[in-house]
Amino acid sequence: MFGAQLHPSITIGTDRETAAALEKMGARHRDAAVTEAVVDVENRLVTTPCYMSAKTISQVAEGAQNAVDELLKLVDQSTATTA
C-alpha cells in the first residue's frame, strides 16, 4: 500500500473504478485529461494518464512530454532549494 503513509496525489485519468481502488490504498486521485500531468510537489511525484487513456500515439507523446517537463521543474526547484 504505497499510499498508506504518503497519501500521494496521482492520476490514472478518469476511470472511476481504478481511481477508487487507488484511493482505497491511500492515494488521492485527481482526474486529468490524457495529455495532462498531475504533480504532487510534497511527495515529488509526477503522473499522467497518457498510457491508460490515449487514443493515438501523439496523445501518448504529448502526455509523456508534459510529465517530463513537470518532472524537470521539480528537479529545478529541488536544486534551487538545496543550493
Image (cartoon, grey):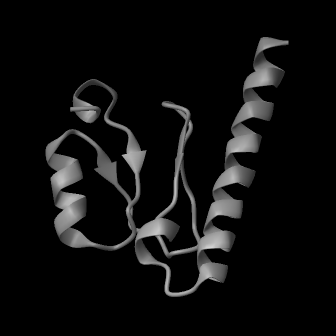
- At x 48%, y 31%, the residue is 43
Compare residues 71 and 41 and report the one nearer the observer. Answer: 71
Closer to us: 80 or 63: 63
Count of numbered marks: 0
Looking at this rendering, what residue extends furthest in the top direction?
83
Whether residue 52 is situated above or below residue 59 in the rendered picture? above
Q: Is residue 23 left or right of residue 69?
A: left
Is 42 drawn above or below residue 65 in the view shown?
A: above
Q: Residue at x 23, y 50 (%)?
A: 22
Image quarter where the N terminus lies is top left
Give residue 74's quadrant in the image: top right
Q: Is residue 58 above or below residue 77?
A: below
Q: Quadrant of the C terminus?
A: top right
Residue most toward the front?
Answer: 57
On the rendered structure, is 46 left or right of 11?
Answer: right
Give me the residue at 16% from left, 54% from top.
Answer: 21
Report x, y in % for residue 2. Answer: 28, 32
Judge left or right: residue 11 versus residue 42: left
Residue 77, given in percent of the width and then of the height, sits at 76, 31
Q: Looking at the picture, does residue 18 appear above or below residue 59? A: above
Residue 33 x, y percent position in the rendering: 49, 75
| Closer-to-camera residue (8/61) | 61
**Could you say where residue 41 lies in the image, as x and y percent from the top left?**
56, 37
